[in-house]
């Protein structure tokens, strides 16, 4: 008899966005991130500071034998 156990791991992502041109970029969540926070990164298109537009988690299922 075989028993498959599925465990779920989560990966948290942060979406950065330029408020001027709409450029978006995704990166790993960092401690201290919150929505509408101005980050120390600028838009590669126009140099405007990027803000955190959203934070979400992605569930990844893993099968264990």
Image (cartoon, rainbow, N blue to C red):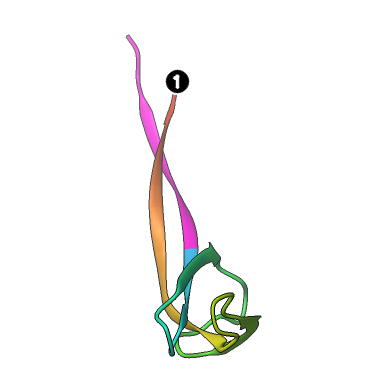
x and y percentages locating residue 52 in the rendered image: 49, 82
x and y percentages locating residue 41 in the rendered image: 64, 80
Q: Determine the image quadrant of residue 64.
A: top left
x and y percentages locating residue 14 in the rendered image: 49, 70
Residue extending farthest to the right is: 40
| Position above or below: 25 against 46 | above
Q: Is residue 58 magenta?
A: no
Asked which secondary structure carries label 1, the reply is: loop
Q: Residue at x 42, y 83 (%)?
A: 21
- Foreground residue, 4 or 26? 26
Q: Residue at x 38, y 30 (%)?
A: 5
Q: Determine the image quadrant of residue 3.
A: top left
What is the tally of numbered marks visible in this picture?
1
Q: Determine the image quadrant of residue 63.
A: top left
| Position above or below: 16 against 58 | below
Q: Residue at x 35, y 13 (%)?
A: 2
Left or right, residue 44 beside residue 61: right
Q: Would you say the magenta stretch is mainly helix, strand or loop? A: strand
**Which quadrant: the N terminus?**
top left
| Position above or below: 64 against 49 | above
**Which quadrant: the C terminus?**
top left
x and y percentages locating residue 54 in the rendered image: 40, 77
Residue extending farthest to the front is: 46
Badge 1 density bin: few <14, some 14–19, many ≥20, Cα 10 Å:
few
Q: Residue at x 46, y 90 (%)?
A: 36
Left or right, residue 4 beside residue 40: left
Please give the residue where the numbered disc 1 appears in the rendered image.
65
Range of magenta residues: 1-12
């Amino acid at each position: 008899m075989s028993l498959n156990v599925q465990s779920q791991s989560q990966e948290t992502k942060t979406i950065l966005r330029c408020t001027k041109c709409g450029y978006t970029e995704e990166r790993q969540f960092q401690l201290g991130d919150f929505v509408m926070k101005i980050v120390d990164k600028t838009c590669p298109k126009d140099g405007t500071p990027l803000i955190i537009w959203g934070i979400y988690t992605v569930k990844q299922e893993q099968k264990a034998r």
